[in-house]
Image (cartoon, grey):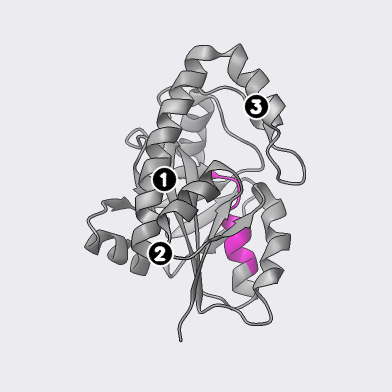
């Protein structure tokens, strides 16, 4: 029997996917640290894997709640990786009533918080969204010969700043709640923007998980 495994970064993203999915997803660390956890999929690998989560919008049209399934992922160091399964996933979501965008995703080693930097990255790399796991997860699963795709829901667009929460993610890929709260408190208006966008994104993420599972 074909088996699909859903992955989601630990925390609010994982909880949203778990609430929507028919079967519990696999929780992974944030950032490149997620790769180490993929070995748990062996020795009985699934037929396919989909990584679900939130992302920052880089282009002028991305708004909170938009669903993006990129055909290619890149890193700031020039690595590139195609995602052949993306078109199939977009068709599945389209049949379920979800409007999805494609394009190229950028995987960063940190959270991109400033609108000006988002716009610069979009222009420089020609990318639609930015996350912290997409490229690395796809690359490892390709090595494992497991078909995979990344589905992201935009939580913050490129038309405004969010709090600088880069220090809230530890080197082990775990979220640091106290650091997050501290940074949110320093920029209340930006924090409100992030909270509203994230709530919208998480609500859509639950619906997407239900459709894919």
Specify start and end residues of the magenta stretch as a single range.
Answer: 131-140
Q: Nearer the viewer, residue 151 or 62?
A: 151
Q: Quadrant of residue 46?
A: bottom right
- Disc nearer the start of the sequence (1/2): 2
**Callout 2: SS:** helix
Residue 136 counted in the magenta span: yes
Please provide percent x and percent y for residue 121.
Answer: 52, 36
Please provide percent x and percent y for residue 188.
Answer: 53, 13
Using the numbered discs, state the Cα–Cα distance from disc 1 to disc 2 in whole angstroms. 14 Å
Farthest residue in the right direction? 171
Q: Quadrant of the C terminus?
A: bottom left
Please provide percent x and percent y for residue 177.
Answer: 68, 31
Q: Which mark is residue 180?
A: 3
Residue 19 counted in the magenta span: no
Q: According to the image, label 2 marks what residue?
A: 86
Relative to 33, 61 lies left or right: left
Using the numbered discs, state the Cα–Cα distance from disc 1 to disc 3 in whole angstroms. 21 Å
- When the figure is inspected, residue 82 is found, relative to residue 18, above or below; the finding is below
Q: Quadrant of residue 22?
A: bottom left
Mark 3 surroundings: few (<14), some (14-19) or many (≥20) residues within 10 A: some
């Amino acid at each position: 029997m074909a088996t699909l495994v859903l992955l989601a970064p630990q925390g609010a993203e994982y909880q949203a996917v778990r609430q929507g999915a028919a079967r519990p997803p696999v929780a992974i660390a944030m950032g490149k640290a997620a790769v180490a956890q993929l070995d748990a999929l062996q020795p009985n690998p699934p037929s396919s894997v989909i990584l679900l989560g939130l992302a920052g919008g880089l282009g002028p049209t991305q708004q909170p709640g938009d669903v993006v399934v990129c055909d290619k992922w890149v890193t700031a160091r020039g690595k590139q990786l195609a995602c052949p399964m993306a078109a199939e996933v977009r068709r599945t979501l389209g049949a379920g009533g979800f409007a999805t965008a494609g394009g190229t995703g950028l995987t960063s080693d940190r959270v991109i918080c400033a609108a000006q930097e988002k716009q610069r990255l979009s222009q420089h790399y020609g990318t639609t969204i930015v996350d912290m796991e997409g490229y690395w997860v796809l690359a490892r699963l390709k090595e494992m010969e497991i078909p995979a795709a990344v589905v992201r829901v935009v939580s913050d667009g490129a038309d405004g700043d969010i709090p600088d929460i880069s220090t809230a993610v530890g080197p082990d890929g775990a979220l640091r709640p106290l650091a997050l709260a501290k940074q949110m408190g320093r920029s209340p208006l930006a924090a409100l923007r992030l909270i509203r966008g994230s709530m919208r994104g998480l609500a859509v993420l639950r619906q997407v998980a239900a459709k894919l599972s």
